[in-house]
Image (cartoon, rainbow, N blue to C red):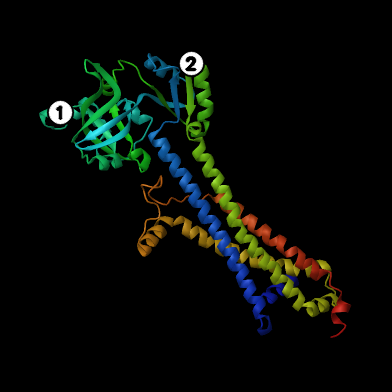
Amino acid sequence: MSYELFIGLRYLRAKRKQTFVSIITFISIAGIFLGVAALIIVLAVMNGFETELRNKILGINSHIVLMEYGGSIKDYKKVIKDIEEVEGVVASTPFIYSQAMLKKGHSVSGVVLRGLSTESAMRVINLGKMDGGSIDYLSEKARNAIKLKADLASLPGIVIGKELAKNLGAFIFETVNVLSPMGVSTPMGMVPRMKKFLVVGIFDSGFYEYDASLAFLSLKECQKFLHMEDLVTGIEIKVVDIYKAGVIAKTIGKKLGYPYWTKNWMQMNKNLFSALKLEKRVMFIILSLIVLVAAFNIISTLIMVVMEKNRDIAILKSMGATAKGIMKIFVLQGIIIGAVGTILGCIGGLAVALNLEKVSLFVEKLFGFKILPQDVYYLSELPSQVNYGDVFIIVAGTMLICFLSTIYPSLRASRLDPTEALRYE
């Protein structure tokens, strides 16, 4: 062990006269601990929130959407064949998008009606878990396999979200009426188009907005209901790498040419993910201020130690210690304080971040409130995903701040004149 490290560690041990200095040292360690732990936990939550949100959005929605300028796609089967020849495309499926109203008894709710192909849709999208029934029951063949009453067996199927089912008071294998705003012309004027459907599935995507406003029909039944013949609104596409969706979308657009246009998931959710990135940066800056405050405590601690140890520094210099050696003593002292706080902060932060779900459940039970109410926030649970790259940046940044905070006090100690310090001793 070098004499600089030995003396630095000795100065960290408080004597009776140095109690105040020792308290400030512990405050510095506590400040760095809190700053590092808070940064790790908050960034883990932000990463988890972004990942969870992206997974849920890309579950219900596809990576790329292809549509036609001015209306619906006619020869969609040929278009799908051309799309699936593009490198990077996993699967594609036609869809119909329309707005409608669902009615059950006296309950009415506006919905987004989506027609999907029962053969290919599940290769592109994922509705999450089913609270009852199955998406397969949208197919007439699958529905025939269930022993339903004669009056229900003839009805077309519909799959609705969990929250929508609650709002309507609809249960599995019950009927609902679908009303289309595209009316039918009669001698009495325009009358809304209405048809009875059988609820064959209730899905739970975990995303309140989707669960409360989406209803799925089979492509054929949707075409019949909306009088679209063999037309579709567009084609949904799934790709191998979601971060190459933009490049693949451009390739598809160039291959098919006008009148087709494409939009990828990043463009469709640009505002949401940009806001999340900005929030993450702002939170990082705000929480870094805790570490900066702790760094100022390190500066004040070292300055007081230097002032108190003037005699010791003078004796060391008279015994042959160099200015560089004296400087090293106080730099090591500051780095030790920073390292202890950073290590404890890392352990504490990672322990909470990796067990955040259990911690949040404990807090909810203790104080009797819900941290993320499902009807207010996008998610019902507090997500957490530790990015070890972020942890490394936090640790490296904290240690750099701690090192920089030692420079002024250690320089002051190294420039001390031993004759002036020992004149009155």
Q: Residue furthest front?
A: 188
Seen from the viewer's position, the closer of residues 114 and 425 is 114
Q: Which mark is residue 153?
A: 1
Q: Against 253, is 161 above or below?
A: below
The crowd level at tag 2 (other Cα within 10 Å; few <14, some 14-19, many 20+) is few
Q: Amino acid at mark 2?
A: Leu
> From mark 2 to mark 1, how far is it between C-alphas?
41 Å
Q: Against 336, is 288 above or below?
A: above
- In screen coordinates, is 294 left or right of 2? left
Q: Which quarter of the rendered picture does the C terminus lie within?
A: bottom right
Residue 127 lies, in percent from the top left, at 34, 36
Specify whether residue 219 is in view: no
- In screen coordinates, is 309 left or right of 398? right
- In screen coordinates, is 33 left or right of 69? right
Name the residue rendered at 46%, 47% in the picture. Answer: 49
Residue 253 lies, in percent from the top left, at 50, 20
For label 2, the SS is helix
Name the residue rendered at 68%, 73% in the picture. Answer: 9
Q: Which mark is residue 256?
A: 2
Q: Earlier in the sequence, mark 2 or mark 1?
A: 1
Q: Which mark is residue 122?
A: none
Q: Which quarter of the rendered picture does the N terminus lie within?
A: bottom right
Specify whether residue 289 is in view: yes
Name the residue rendered at 42%, 52% in the picture. Answer: 382
Callout 2–callout 1 Cβ contact below 8 Å: no
Q: Against 289, is 195 above or below?
A: above
Seen from the viewer's position, the closer of residues 249 and 123 is 249
For label 1, the SS is helix
Q: Against 34, is 280 above or below?
A: above
Q: Amino acid at mark 1?
A: Ala
